[in-house]
Amino acid sequence: MTAAIYPGTFDPITCGHIDIARRAAEIFDRLVVGVYDVPAKKLLFSTEERVWLAARALDDIGNVEVTSFGGLTVDFARKAGAKVIVRGLRALSDFEAEMQLAHFYRKMAPELDVVCLMSSLEYGFLSATMVKEIISLGGQSEGLVPDFVADAIRQEYARAKEASPRR
Ligand code: ADP
C-alpha cells in the first residue's frame, strides 16, 4: 500500500488543489492532505477553517483524509506513513521553488520521493491569492472554488471590513 501526503497552505482550497488531490487519490492508496498550520504568509483563514473547508471539498473521496500539521513536512510524511509527497505544478514559475523544496526534502529524508502533478489546463493560472482578490472585489467564483468556499471568503472579508471599516 502506498500512502502519500499533499501538503500546502490551502488558504482556502481551490478547484486547482481539488483537482490535484482527486488525481493523486487515484494514483495512491491513501492520500493525507496536510494543512500547514503557520506558514510565513499572511492568511485569511485559521488552521481549523482551512482544514474544515478542505475536508468538506474532498469528503466524497474515500481514500483522502485532511489534517493540519506543524513543523517539518518530512516529519509529517513519516508520521503519516507516507513514501510520497505530492505537489502541484502550474506554470514554469512554480518549477524552481518546487525543485528547491524537493531537493531539501530528499536531503532530510532520502526515503521519501516527491511527485509533481501538472495542473489541468483550466486551473493552470489559478491561485488561492488570485481567487481571494477576485471574490473580495465582487467577481464571479464559478470554476475557481466550490460555492461554500466562495461564501466563506465573502464572509471573512465582510467581517474584516466591519472590524476595520477603512480597509
Ligand atoms: P504552498 O503555500 O505550499 O505553495 P498552496 O496551498 O499554495 O501551498 O499549494 C499547495 C500545492 O498545490 C503546491 O504544490 C501548489 O503548487 C499546488 N497548487 C496550487 N494551486 C494549484 C493549481 N491551480 N493547480 C495545480 N496545483 C496547484
Image: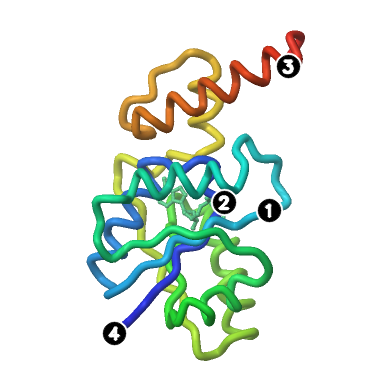
Q: Closer to us: mark 4 or mark 2?
A: 4
Q: Residue furthest top?
A: 165
Q: Closer to us: mark 2 or mark 3?
A: 3
CB contact under 8 Å: marks 2 and 1: yes
Q: Which residue is mark 3?
A: 163
Q: Image check: 15 left or right of 101?
A: left
| Coordinates of residue 60 in the picture (x, y in percent) | 24, 51
- What residue is shown at x 35% (from left), y 28% (from top)? 147
* Residue type at numbered disc 2: Thr
Which label's residue is closer to the chain start, 2 or 1?
A: 2
Q: CA distance from mark 2 to mark 1?
A: 7 Å
- What residue is shown at x 32% (from left), y 82% (from top)? 2
Q: Residues within 10 Å of mark 4 (few under 14, many from 20)?
A: few
| Coordinates of residue 27 in the picture (x, y in percent) | 25, 71
Task: Name the foreground residue: 1 vs 97.
Answer: 1
Q: Image check: 123 left or right of 99?
A: left
* Residue type at numbered disc 3: Ala
Image: 10 above or below 76: above
Please give the label number shown on residue 1: 4
CB contact under 8 Å: marks 3 and 4: no
At mark 4, the secondary structure is loop
| Coordinates of residue 30 in the picture (x, y in percent) | 32, 72
Q: Quadrant of residue 33?
A: bottom left
Q: Which residue is mark 2?
A: 9
* Residue type at numbered disc 1: Pro
Q: Image check: 71 left or right of 62?
A: right
Q: CA distance from mark 4 to mark 1?
A: 30 Å
* Residue type at numbered disc 4: Met
Disc 2: residue Cβ within 8 A of ligand 1's nearest atom: yes
Q: Which residue is mark 1?
A: 39
Which label's residue is closer to the chain start, 3 or 4?
A: 4
- What residue is shown at x 50% (from left), y 40% (from top)? 12
